[in-house]
Amino acid sequence: MPLSLISNDKQKRSGISRAEIADLYYNCPTDELISIGQRITVQNHGKSILLRGLVEFSNYCDRSCLYCGIRKENDYVKRYRLDKNQILEIVKLGYERGLRTFVLQGGEDSYFSTDYLCEITKGVKDYTGDSAALTLSCGIHSRSQYRELADAGADRYLIRFETANPELHSFIRQNIPLSKRLKAIETLKEEGFQVGSGFMIGLPKETDEDRIDNIMLAGELELGMAGIGPFIPHPDTPLAGSLQHPIELSVRATALLRMVLPKTHIPATTAAGTLDPQGREMMIQAGANVLMPNITPTEAKKNYLLYPGKICLDESGIQCIGCLSIRVKPLDRELSFAKGDTL
Ligand code: SAM
Ligand code: SF4
Ligand code: FES
């Protein structure tokens, strides 16, 4: 248990201790957790749900994470890369529809060299200026590479720590230590990025104590955004056939995460919407304040299958924005096209 990662000082800063979170985790009924999470969310973020347009630019990956459907060894994946012009075209369409944050996500694909990623970043920022934020999410790189990307104009970086349990991390990420991932997060912050991170929940061998550690570690990292994705076993990975936990696990964790991180942006994740048709709505009720419509062209996104059954494969991101605006109404929320910087 990496409690050493969580100093007493930092536990105090988040205002709620591990013991209190553990007590709520084990003993508090779900309805109550949701109502506390919701109250804190509305107090800190109002009734707006921020939108971030997701562009899945490459499903090539040089890594072999055991959980991931696009891992290098999965020969069933039809691989694709979007080029700079395609990415810029998608961003322009999203911008015209009002989006003011774009997240470029992909595998750790060496074809996208730092120079090329910088070119794409500059292209996006030349078009949007400071009126929109650009987030990158393409894994671990060196400090100098992160610096070049920041200099090119990238504002934010998304990199989940996946699990706070160092042994489990090494197992699922094929011997890449948790410390390396955490170091990358620190380096990104030092290089001026607003950093988003988070974890999957329901991984094989994960314990209740690991889940509490996940929440506390997210609190310690002082993140701009923190996300929870239910782990969904992919049939063409070594973790095929693992137990699928119910959505309630993610919903409860979202409420606890909100208690630890009142001001941090928390997404209602696509994985939650995949696991349960109402998954994203449940996460919003428990404490999420961000939705990420997938604006990747439909012919590409159907091949970015991290897990089976992914939603919104036949709809364009623009259609999803319409769908989401209807979905949040019964929750007494409204979509916001604001840039949504770290609070
Ligand atoms: N390659 C980059 C990285 O690993 O940070 C970014 C892309 S990666 C596919 C984005 C996220 O997908 C991962 O951080 C992981 O949490 C999530 N993911 C991958 N496989 C998953 C699965 N089977 N179930 C749920 N989430 C999954
Ligand atoms: Fe590659 Fe990221 Fe999937 Fe790991 S999680 S295999 S780094 S895309
Ligand atoms: Fe994509 Fe509803 S959010 S179709």
Image: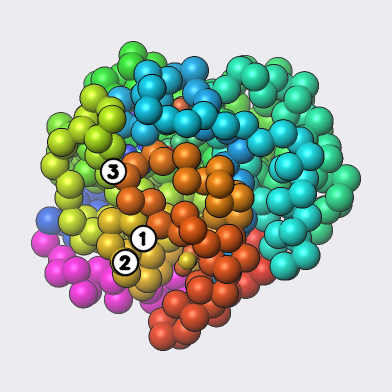
Q: Is residue 297 something that shows in the picture?
A: yes
SS class of the residue under badge 2? loop
Q: Dot 1 surroundings within 10 Å: few (below 14), some, or many (20 or more)?
A: many
Amino acid at dot 1 = Gly
What secondary structure is the stretch in magenta mostly built from?
helix
Task: Give the number of marks.
Answer: 3
Residue corresponding to mark 3: 231
Residue at screen point 57% across, 68% down:
319
Residue corresponding to mark 2: 277
SS class of the residue under badge 3? loop
Residue 140 image position (x, y, % from top left) = 54, 23
Residue at screen point 47% across, 31% down:
78
Query: In whole angstroms, how far apart are the C-alphas of marks 2 and 1?
Result: 5 Å
Residue corresponding to mark 1: 273
- How has the structure been colored for display? rainbow
In this picture, which residue range is highlighted in magenta?
27-46
Q: Which circle, 2 or 3, is nearer the viewer?
A: 2
Residue at screen point 76% across, 25% down:
116
Residue at screen point 28% across, 62% down:
276
